[in-house]
Image (cartoon, coloured by chain):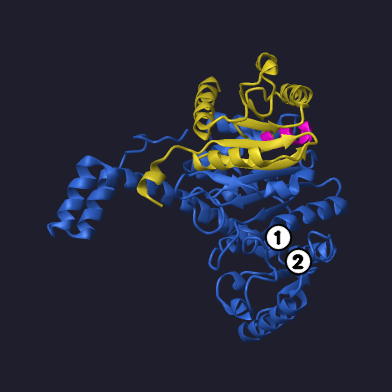
Chain colours: A blue, B yellow
Amino acid sequence: MTNDTKELVERVRGGTSQWVRATARLMSLIENCPERIPELLIGAADWPMPRMVVGLTGPPGCGKSVLVDGLITEFRIRDPQGRIGVIAVDPSSPFSGGAFLGDRFRMMRHASDRMVFLRSAATRGHVGGLLLGVNAFIRILGLAGCRTVLIETVGVGQNETEIADVADFVVVTIAPGHGDAIQLLKCGLMEVGDIFVVNKADCEGAAQLYAQLRAVLRLDSGERKRGMPDTCLVSASRRRGIEELVDLCEKRAALSQPAWEARRRQAMISEVKAAVLEEARQRLIRALNSESVGSRDVNRVLRGELAISNFVDGLIQSTTGTRDAATNHG
Amino acid sequence: MSDNADMKRIPERVLIGKVGLDGHDRGAKYVAHILRDAGYEVIYTGIRRTPQQIVETAIQEDVAMIGLSFLSGAHKKLLTQVLDLLKERDAIDIVVTVGGSIPSADIPDLKAMGIAEVFTPGASSRSIVEAVGSLLKEHRQAV
C-alpha cells in the first residue's frame, strides 16, 4: 500500500474522531482511482468484516430508499451498539458524466446518527447496477466497524444482477403499478432474490401482486429444486412489515454464513479482475484515439488492408507501459 | 457511452440542500439540476435539514462544496452554525456557497465569514456553473 492509503487506513481503523472523514476519503480514493482497488483488497486480508451484507434491488420508484431508511431504524433498535454502513448507488449520466444522487434524501433523519455511515455513489459508467469498487467499499466499512452493511442498487431494469455476487443475500423489492404478472416471469431480476418484498402494501393491487408473486416463486422453486425464497408484504412509508423483513434477514444471515464467506472471497477476486479490465480498457481507448495507432489503423481496416484481429494485436502491444500517459487518476 | 465520456475528468461531488424552516426548494432543485448537467455528482439533501445533518452528510459524502439555498432570512445565523461545525470537524476546506433571497447588504458579511460565493435571484445557470467551476479549481489546488 502506498503511504497516503496507509495513513487513511490507520485513521479509519483507529476509530478516533477523524474516522468518518478518513473513511469518506478512502472511499473517494477508490472511486477516483479504480486501478488501486487490488492494492486495497490485498492489504485488507486481516480487516474485520461486516457480519451481514444485505443487497437491496428493484425497479426505480418501488420504494427501495424508504425501505432502507426503515431497515436502518430497525437494525439500530435491535443492535444499539452496532454501527451500520449504507452504500446507495444511483446512475451517472452517460452524456454529462454527472449524477443526481437522491437516495440519501429519504434517509436524512439518520444523517447525524454517529452509528450510521451513509455513502451515495454514482455508477460512473459501470454496468450491472453498482459501482466498480463496491467490494472495496464494503471492506472499508468493515474496517470502520460497521457490523451491518446495506447496499441499494440503482433502480434496475431486468438484467442488473451484479448485486447477487456482492451481497450475502439479496432483497428484491417490487411494488404494484409496475406491470402485470407477466413481468414476474422474466429472467434476471426475478432470479436473484433470496427475499422478495412487495412494497407499498397500502396501495391498491398490492395483495394481488403478492399472491401472483408467491405463485410464480412456488413454481420456480419446484422446477429448480432450490428452496422457496422468503416473501414479505411491506409498507415502508407507513413502517409496516419492516420487523418481519429484518427477521427474515437475520434468518438468511444465519443460514448462509459459510456460503457467504466463500462468496465474499469470490467477489473480491471478481473485483480485482474488473479493476484490471478497467485499466486495460482505459489504455486501449487512449490508444484507439491516438493519432499514430488509432486513426491510421482504423482507416486501414476500413480499406480492407488490415484484419480486425491484427489491429487488436497491434493495439494491445502499443498500450504496454502507457501507465502514466494522460491518466487523470491519482 | 462515447469514448470522450470515458476519457473525461473524474466527476466532482457537491452537496445541495436547505437548512432552516422555509420549504421553498425550487432554486435548490434547479441548481442541483444544472450542476448535474455540468458533470457534477450532486448529493441532494432536500429541505428543513439541520446544520449538523448538512455537515455530517458533506463529510461522509466527501464533497468539495456545500451549496445552501435560503428564502427565510435566517441565513446569517444558520450559516454561522454550518461554518462552526465544519471548523469543529476539521473540514474547513469544504467550499460553502449560498443562493436565494439574500439582501445585498448582507453579502460582504457573509463573505467575511467565509462564504465563498453568494448567488442572488436572477443569477444565470451559466454564471453559476462557471463560478462553481473556478471555486473548485482553486479548492483542488489548495488541497
Give the percent coordinates (x, y) of residue B137. 50, 25
The image quarter in which residue A241 lies:
bottom right
In the image, is residue A315 above or below residue B35?
Answer: below
Identify the residue shown where x is 80% and y is 36%. Answer: B21
Identify the residue shown where x is 86% and y is 47%. Answer: A80
Amino acid type at circle 2 is Lys
In the image, is residue B83 above or below residue A39?
Answer: above
Determine the secondary structure under disc 2: loop
Q: Are marks 1 and 2 in contact (CB under 8 Å)?
A: yes
Label 1 sits on residue: A63
Same chain? Circles 1 and 2: yes
Amino acid type at circle 1 is Gly
B55 falls in the magenta region? yes
Q: Closer to the camera, A155 or A296? A: A155
Magenta stretch: dominant SS?
helix
Residue that lies at the very extreme toward the front in this rendered image: B122
